[in-house]
Amino acid sequence: MNINKLHEMTNWLNKEHLDGVILTDYHDIAYLTGFNSDPIERVLALVLFANYEPFLFGPALEVNSMVVSGWQFDTVGYEDNQNPWKMIASKLKSLTSGTQFAIQFDQITLSRYNALKKALPNVSFLKDATGQINQMRLIKSKDELQKMKVAGQEADKAFEIGFNLMENGISEISLASDIEYQLKKLGISNMSFETLVQFGAHAANPHGTSSLIPLKSHEMVLFDLGTIHDGYASDATRTIAYGKVDDLSEKIHAVVLEAQLTAQSKAKIGMTANELDNIARKVITKAGFGPNFVHRLGHGLGTSVHEFPSIVAGNDLILKEGMAFSIEPGIYIPNMAGVRIEDSGYMSKNGFIPFTETSKSLYQH
Ligand code: MN
Ligand code: MN
């Protein structure tokens, strides 16, 4: 439970003259409460008030875990045969007659909003809390960075396992699932997303999935993976050779590596996200592969694997100490080859400090 952040939210409610806020994004709830659980289709809500103590609402089967996770305020659980919105409403009305509440516009579906309005006909939900939470999540504390560092070390371990598992004939899916299996046996049980392994030309699809394609000699292998440590995500990518690869593969690997290292070494507090994207993009464009770098340079991460800041052209957001994000340039040549190299890290007074340290060389020994 993050009492300082909860206070910050309460201060925001007072500043905005709101009676409370109903938060429904489970990443945001994890950030504020320490209770990290994806409710899937069930309802999880954190209700904060300007003048009363908050309560955490969720499936009855989760209430014990909420307490175990360190949540010290009230909890309310609902059974599957109960109407969660009615229950939130009656608890809320027992605490306040206030009528001005914020919600998360991006997180609540229209049908859920209608159910909430029906349960609380006198309450208006005109204010969006998402911007406030995003702003808070943007700057990581020392404690958060420490968790992310450990998640990065776990990602390094995953690369080590993956590199050692490469052999003729193994499929992308086998390699990806063997990495996760070996990690699980070490007690690292949560990935921040499904491990992605792509061979040769298949890596030219940056949003692809692992397939049954078998590994052959003289191909590059792309590993994109991350774990969750104590609620915080890592995200890193390496593209390495399995046997000697052709000139084009070597060329694009060298260009992506130069772009990645240049951006990493030039990232400074005070520059904009746009400027940082441009530093990497310039290296790739100069080498003639500009049109093949088809995505932004990076994204923030923390309790979720994609959050603010977005390191993208046109974003004038200024990089500040404590912001955590990925630097992940790529070159994708359809039907031929794809390379992406990614480290996530954070901004310090001394520049960008990566959470992952695995070698980025094309040829590893
Ligand atoms: Mn990423
Ligand atoms: Mn990634």
Image (cartoon, rainbow, N blue to C red):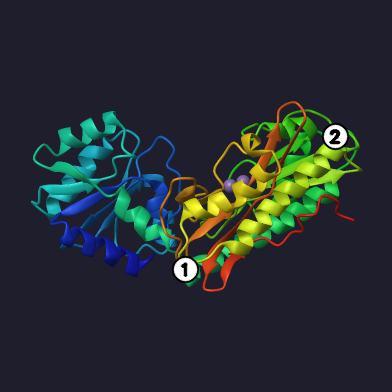
- Label 1 sits on a secondary structure element that is loop
- Residues packed near mark 1 inside 10 Å, few (<14), some (14 to 19) or many (20 plus): some
* Nearer-the-camera pick, 132 or 246: 246
The answer, for residue 325, to whether it is visible in the render is yes
Q: CA distance from mark 2 to mark 1?
A: 42 Å
**Element assignment for label 2:** loop
Q: Residue furthest top?
A: 335
From the image, tell me which residue sits under label 1: 321
**Number of other residues with Cα within 10 Å of mark 2, as a class: few under 14, some 14 to 19, many 20 or more:** many
User: From where the camera sits, is residue 354 visible?
Assistant: no
Q: Is residue 121 left or right of residue 282?
A: left
- Asked whether the beta carbons under mark 2 and mark 1 sit within 8 Å of each other, the answer is no
- Residue type of the residue flagged with mark 1: Glu
Q: Is residue 77 above or below residue 205?
A: below
Q: Which mark is residue 215?
A: 2
Q: Is residue 315 left or right of residue 229?
A: left
Instruction: Please give left or right for residue 275 compared with residue 292 in the image.
Output: left
Q: Residue 139's x, y, as percent? A: 42, 63
Say what amino acid the circle numbered 2 marks. Answer: Leu
Q: In the rendered view, does 203 fall on the left or right side of 142?
A: right
| Residue 220, x across and y down, in percent | 81, 40
